[in-house]
Image: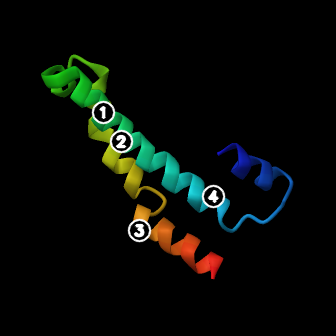
Amino acid sequence: VRETARQWITEQDRRIAPSAAKLFCTEMAGNVADLAVQIHGGYGYSKEYEIERLMRDAPFLLIGEGTSEIQKNIISKRLL
């Protein structure tokens, strides 16, 4: 993410880094939310805990601004 910001500010090649950063961050957010629910067990699904909201919202991160598959396609096309 920092490398993407640096490239954006210095107007370097901006073709791959934004898609790679979005892909990495959204997939990691989903993994972290899933792991948090596993650690907390049944409490992870209770609305009394913040983890329930994180798990509920994680799939929407994957959809906004292009799905993970779209980001992978963008990266692969720009590498070719």
Q: Amino acid at mark 1?
A: Leu
Lower sequence index among marks 2 and 4: 4
Q: Amino acid at mark 2?
A: Asn
- Up-down relation of residue 9 to residue 15 (above or below): above
Instruction: Give the residue number, with chain letter if any, for mark 1.
Output: 35
Are the two marked residues, 3 and 2, in contact with CB atoms closer than 8 angstroms? no
Displayed quadrant of residue 68:
bottom left
Are the two marked residues, 2 and 1, in contact with CB atoms closer than 8 angstroms? yes
Specify few, some or many for label 4: CA neighbours under 10 Å numbering under 14, 14-19, or 20 or more: some
Work out how far the residue at label 3 is from the one at label 4, CA to CA, in angstroms.
Answer: 14 Å
Q: What residue is at 45 percent from the left and 70 percent from the top? A: 70
Work out how far the residue at label 1 is from the one at label 3, CA to CA, in angstroms.
Answer: 22 Å
Specify few, some or many for label 3: CA neighbours under 10 Å numbering under 14, 14-19, or 20 or more: few
Instruction: Give the residue number, with chain letter if any, for mark 3.
Output: 69
Circle 3 sits in a helix, a strand or a loop, which is it? helix
Lower sequence index among marks 3 and 2: 2
Picture coordinates of residue 42 (x, y %)? Answer: 13, 23
Picture coordinates of residue 39 (x, y %)? Answer: 25, 24
Hey, which residue is sitting farthest left in the picture? 42
Instruction: Give the residue number, with chain letter if any, for mark 4.
Output: 18
